[in-house]
Image (cartoon, rainbow, N blue to C red):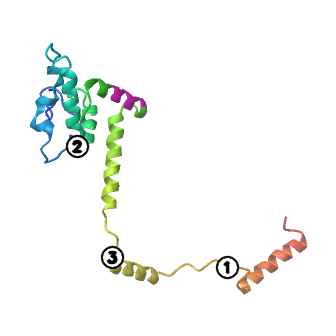
């Protein structure tokens, strides 16, 4: 296979795109324990087994379907076409991965890997922010005390509910004088 299923790509000639890392898990995965199951290019149809390749593909895709890192594996496989030229990666064949890459280029542009990596980064930040604990009662009380210590801005004048202040009465007189003299236009 072109890539190593242990999470470390074969870097002898090609280096993986680092914007989308290979998914990491400590669980024993089928692709790591039996990597030959995913090398469907090595299986050919014979007279004894006319549908051998089709059966091998079904086994490989079934093994991927319950994997906890299948989404990350698919992103990595799509971002690194040079390393995934053979085999089943994230329950997809080479033909399916090529089709998916073309769809991503059409939808997100030529740098779709960067767009997907940025979306993943934002998603991780939102998840991290969601894990922040709400403020304690003590923190809420301290915040309220801080706000009460700061002088607040006076409420705006409501002319229908409050009496007219001397300054407002003088301003009203000036406006009436200007209107009466005909200078306010």
Asked if residue 53 can be seen in this view, the reply is yes
Q: Is residue 102 magenta?
A: yes
Which is the main secondary structure of the residues drawn in magenta? helix
Give neighbour class at mark 1: few <14, some 14-19, many 20+ (Cα, 10 Å).
few
The answer to which quarter of the image holds residue 168 is bottom right
Asked if residue 20 can be seen in this view, the reply is no
- Residue at image point 11% right, 27% down: 12
The answer to which quarter of the image holds residue 147 is bottom left
Between marks 1 and 2, how big is the CA–CA gap?
62 Å
Tell me if label 3 and label 1 are in contact, CB under 8 Å. Answer: no
Q: Residue 100, percent across and down? A: 34, 29
Instruction: Tell me the number on the disc at residue 169.
Output: none
Query: Residue at label 2?
Result: 69
- Left or right: residue 52 compared with residue 19: left
- Residue at image point 30% right, 62% down: 131
Q: Looking at the picture, tell me which residue is in the foreground, 47 or 121.
A: 47
Q: Nearer the viewer, mark 1 or mark 2?
A: 2
Q: Is residue 176 magenta?
A: no
Among all residues in the image, which is located at the extreme right?
181
Query: Residue at label 1?
Result: 157
Q: Compared to 145, does 121 lie above or below?
A: above
- Mark 1 falls on what kind of element? loop
Magenta-tinted stretch: 99-106
Instruction: Tell me the number on the disc at residue 136.
Output: 3
Mark 1 or 2, nearer chain start = 2
- Mark 3 falls on what kind of element? loop
Q: Nearer the viewer, mark 3 or mark 1?
A: 3
């Amino acid at each position: 296979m072109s890539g190593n299923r242990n999470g470390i790509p074969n870097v002898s000639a090609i280096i993986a795109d680092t914007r989308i890392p290979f998914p990491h898990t400590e669980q024993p995965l089928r692709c790591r324990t039996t990597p030959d199951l995913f090398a469907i290019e090595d299986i050919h149809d014979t007279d004894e087994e006319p549908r051998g390749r089709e059966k091998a593909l079904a086994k490989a895709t079934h093994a991927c379907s319950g994997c906890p890192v299948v989404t990350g594996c698919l992103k990595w496989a799509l971002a690194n076409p040079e390393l995934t030229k053979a085999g089943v990666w994230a329950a997809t064949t080479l033909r399916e991965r090529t089709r998916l890459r073309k769809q991503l280029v059409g939808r997100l542009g030529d740098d779709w890997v960067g767009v997907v990596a940025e979306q993943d980064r934002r998603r991780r930040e939102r998840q991290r922010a969601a894990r922040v604990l709400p403020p304690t009662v003590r923190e809420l009380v301290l915040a309220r005390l801080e706000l009460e210590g700061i002088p607040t801005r006076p409420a705006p004048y409501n002319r229908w509910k409050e009496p007219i202040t001397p300054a407002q009465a003088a301003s009203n007189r000036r406006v009436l004088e200007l209107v009466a003299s005909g200078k306010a236009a």
